[in-house]
Amino acid sequence: MAEQDWIIIGQVVAAQGLKGEVRINPSTDFPERFEVPGQRWLQLPNQDPQSVELERGRQIPGKNLFVVKFEHIQDRTQAENIRGAKVLVRAGDRPELEADEYHVSDLIGLEVFDYNTQAKLGIVSDLYTAAQDVLEVTDANQKKHLVPFVKAIVPVVDLVENRLEVDAPPGLFEI
């Protein structure tokens, strides 16, 4: 399968204990992907994704980490061998979203235009989550600008046309 057929939902960062559990740093807003048993895929660097069965999982209280148990990973040595693996799901398994909600992978790469002048400002190169989502926009000079991803500043997101429009407050793209 091609890379666009997969969604990265996390990465194995460490072994947990002695019985084959691993810690996962999630990159998804859907925690059930680490808590509900079922098929997932692991991809080690320079290898094709391999199917694995998630037996169980739980979030570590107070941390943005999950501890999961995959079938056939029985001890710490096996768990350490998958450290660094990406945890994947098929792109077709993306959850349905509400209006004005977007998958991060759909936003990365969108062309960014000024809402008023239609001048091209750059391309969405990343998205950061904190108190609110923030788009990283890289301009033609490779300078990065952080844009709050709120309706008042980003009134238009058009996935069909591969673009979004920014009604930037003065100075946002001049810093």
Image: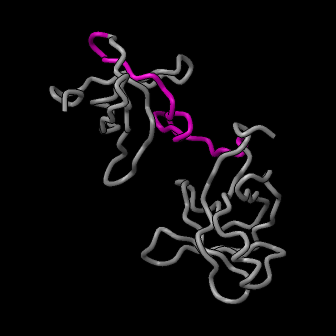
Q: The magenta stretch spans which residues?
A: 91-117
- What's the residue at 45%, 22% (across, down)? 111
Viewed as shown, does residue 121 lie left or right of 33?
Answer: left
> Which image quadrant: the N terminus?
top right
Q: Is residue 98 magenta?
A: yes
Q: Is residue 59 magenta?
A: no
- What's the residue at 44%, 25% (across, down)? 157
Q: Between residue 25 and residue 165, name the one nearer to us.
A: 25
Q: Which of the 4 image quadrants contains residue 41?
A: bottom right
Q: Which of the 4 image quadrants contains residue 105?
A: top right
- What's the residue at 38%, 24% (across, down)? 122
Residue at the left extreme, as displayed: 170
**Residue 127, x across and y down, in percent:** 43, 43
- What's the residue at 48%, 38% (across, down)? 101
Q: Is residue 84 above or below residue 81?
A: above
**Residue 148, x across and y down, in percent:** 30, 39
Q: Is residue 112 above or below residue 2?
A: above
Q: Which of the 4 image quadrants contains residue 136?
A: top left
**Residue 71, x across and y down, in percent:** 81, 73
Viewed as shown, does residue 50 lie left or right of 65?
Answer: right
